[in-house]
Image (cartoon, rainbow, N blue to C red):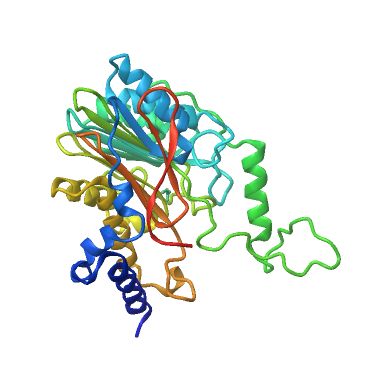
Amino acid sequence: MNDLSTLTRRFFLKAAALAGAGAALDPMRALARSSTAPAAAMHKAASLPISIASANGLEATKRAVAMMRDGKDTLDAVIAGVNLVENDPEDDTVGYGGLPNEDGVVELDSCVMHGPTMRGAGVAALRNIKNPSLVAQRVMERTDHVLLVGEGALRFARAHGFREENLLTDASREKWLSWKEHLSKQDDWLPPHGEEDRDIGALFGVEGRPTGTINCLGLNDRAEISGVTTTSGLAFKIPGRVGDSPILGAGLYVDGSIGAAGSTGRGEANLLSLASFLIVERMRAGDAPTDACLQACQRIVAQTKMKRLLSEDGMPAFNVNFYALNVRGEFGGASIWSGRRFAVNEGGESRLVDSAYLFER
Ligand code: GLY
């Protein structure tokens, strides 16, 4: 039996135990009913507007809801929300102070999507501009294109007056240097070490290397919905690597008549499943947001066949997190692995809500 069969069998056993033999006949239904999904699937906005985001979006969702209450457009609101995180040097996964690529240069990805007009755009591998979400919005509004990358995206940003700056803070530079020094015993970069130290190997496994990001979705009281995802991407990536965050359908998808979904976590896995699009399509078919997110997680697990991405017991050695909000104000989040939360604001203070999950750590 190969790893995938083992994994699938474990999943079915768990699903059957939790959901009953009938549910186990349909893997997607069984999945939706397993673990914490039933309770989580009940999330519904107590009032509108509502904004949800990845766990680093407490302030972002608060700002987004305040703006929507003031009558601002849903996309302007969620972008203003994530700008707080892009500008925050303490969040080393987004914007200013983000962890850099392997050359020590911060390279940013973002996309936006506006439900009422079904427009969207992204920028990828953009250097030196703190707010890639605003550049993505400008691509959407002021070009006939959907995706600009690298030097072209930078030149477009310059043309629109965005200020270039070094986005590497001392803290993110130190983390990059530490990664470089621990990378290999076969090169000449050494971390601080003593006479007795032997193990100066890699700091991160596949699971541990930071991929943080912010995704933020917003719905107003006229059932208008929009979303944004923005990130500095996988820490220490090969220059030019593009993750899921700037790709519509992967890091974000919005259908103004159905709802919105976005992601954080291992972008490579999401790029191979276009899971945000999948989630919106599952919601179109009638699934609750949490169930749709869980199905995206299961799709990724089922598609992960390479052993280097599995731990010794055949389980995925990485995590991917999804967030979804429909135009009725129902919302949810799910991850492959337990222990994740997401931010919600319906006015007043934001709160963190437990995400549903496939597997318990
Ligand atoms: N999900 C963010 C990235 O992989 O770049």
Nearer the observer, 344 or 198: 344
Left or right: residue 360 compared with residue 30: right
Residue 158 in view in this figure = no
Q: Residue at x 64, y 47 (%)?
A: 175
The residue most toward the top is: 70
Left or right: residue 150 compared with residue 31: right
In the image, residue 360 above or below residue 77 = below
x, y (%) of residue 327? 20, 34
x, y (%) of residue 253? 25, 42
Task: Quadrant for residue 167, please give it.
Answer: top right
Left or right: residue 188 compared with residue 221: right
Task: Quadrant for residue 122, please give it.
Answer: top left
x, y (%) of residue 355? 39, 48
The residue most toward the bottom is: 1
Nearer the observer, 101 or 234: 234
In the image, residue 242 above or below residue 226 = below
Q: Residue at x 27, y 25 (%)?
A: 48
x, y (%) of residue 271? 32, 55
